[in-house]
Amino acid sequence: MSFRDGRELKESIEALMVRIEKLTDEGVKKMEKKPDLIVLPEAGVPFFSAHNTTVTTVTRRLYWHRFDSLMFLLANRYKANVFFNEIDAGYKGEPSARNLRYYNNNVLYDPNGDRRDSYQKKFLLMFGEYMPFDFLYELSQQTGRFEPGLTHNLIRYYTPADKDKSPKGLHLGWNDTENLSHEAIRSYYEAAKTEVQVSGKFLPLICYEVILPEFVREFRTAGNPEFIVNLTNDKWYGTTTESDQHMELGRLRSIELRRWMVRSTNSGISANIDHLGRFVGDKKTGLMTAETISETIEVIDSPPTFYTQYGNIIPWLMLFLTGLYYLNLLIGIRRGKSS
């Protein structure tokens, strides 16, 4: 299940969190069963981190316990994996202000709400997420100062032993996070904890990474994913054709890898794509609307495709053979003239 928040700038962050909780509950009700995976879009909760570290709490106050708590609560309410986007921070080398770096980070919480694998965006967007030269930040102070991630890694997802396990009392909600610390909420849900097992792995792609075939192929060194999840922020482009172009280019990866895709955007086109590039159930969202999409996708565990392993070797081979043909033709013409 994936959705977009459809927010407006004038709305407070609290209203956004209420909307996320409401959309999740409405989506599950529409499904008439608990989901296995809940997917939020890139920048679904802007400006904050759910990663409680010294860097995100002391050095830079990015961590917000209520954000962390809501993701924990959604995971426990439905005993589902929750995959979402956040800002993370860390040091590149020795701890110092000069070595502080920010990351566009995707992370998964398992059905117990425990933080598991994360992926830091590697292919950053120039002028949006970084500037090629430091002096340019003075000209565009809204541009992020992000650092590319270091690894191509897949994300493990989990299956709970008991999907109906719940706390002794009622489930908590967003409003409860105002008066309860994250530690108190975790303690309340201790009775709801269940065994979880790794079910498989999926390929995490952030925003424009999904339109770069050679970049996506680099993940083959991390293993063989069972499906693709793409979190995207198309808010920059409003209601222009960019959202359609982004969607069309992105679903080519499903065809190349022969894997289904879950695509969640905060303003553009959200959809589930099958391994042939078709919209599952002929469903896709509109632009700038708050919607939820839920579908059952196929988890494919087949060997990597020829394209995944060898890329564009056939077009390059054809180009090489064509070059040889015309080179031979040119040599023949010159020999004919000389004789």
Image (spheres, rainbow, N blue to C red):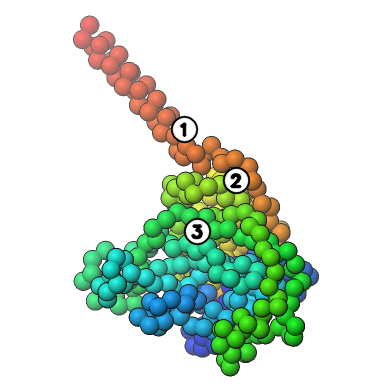
Residue 13: x %, y % from top left: 51, 86
Task: Give the residue displayed 39% in from the left and 61% down from the top.
Answer: 149
Looking at marks 1 and 3 on the same chain, the residue that comes earlier in the sequence is marked by 3
Residue 76 quadrant: bottom right
Q: Quadrant of residue 182?
A: bottom right
Name the quadrant of the C terminus: top left
Identified at 39% across, 72% down, the residue is 89
Q: Is residue 132 left or right of residue 158?
A: left
**Image side of residue 57 versus residue 29, left or right:** left
Q: Which residue is mark 3?
A: 205
Q: Which residue is mark 1?
A: 314
Tell me which numbered mark, 2 or 1, is placed earlier along the sequence: 2
The quarter in which the N terminus is drawn is bottom right
213 with respect to 79 (left or right)? left
Q: Please report contact status of discs 1 and 3: CB closer than 8 Å, yes or no.
A: no
**Residue nearest the observer in this picture, 246 or 44:** 44
Tell me if residue 153 comes above or below residue 33 in the rendering: above
Residue 140, position as x, y percentages in the image: 29, 75
Label 1 neighbourhood size at 10 Å, few (<14), some (14-19), many (20+)? few
* Residue at figure coordinates x 63%, y 78% from the top left: 73
Q: Earlier in the sequence, mark 3 or mark 2?
A: 3
Name, please, the residue furthest toward the bottom.
179
> Could you tell me the amino acid type at mark 1?
Ile
User: Gap in Å between the C-alphas at discs 1 and 3?
Assistant: 26 Å
Q: Is residue 328 left or right of residue 72?
A: left
Please tell me whether residue 179 is drawn above or below residue 105 in the rendered image.
Answer: below
Q: Is residue 182 above or below residue 100?
A: below
Image location of residue 103, percent across then percent down: 40, 68
Residue under numbered circle 2: 258
Crowding at label 2, few (<14), some or many (≥20) Cα neighbours within 10 Å? many
Could you tell me how far apart the alpha carbons at marks 3 and 2 are, in whole angstroms?
16 Å
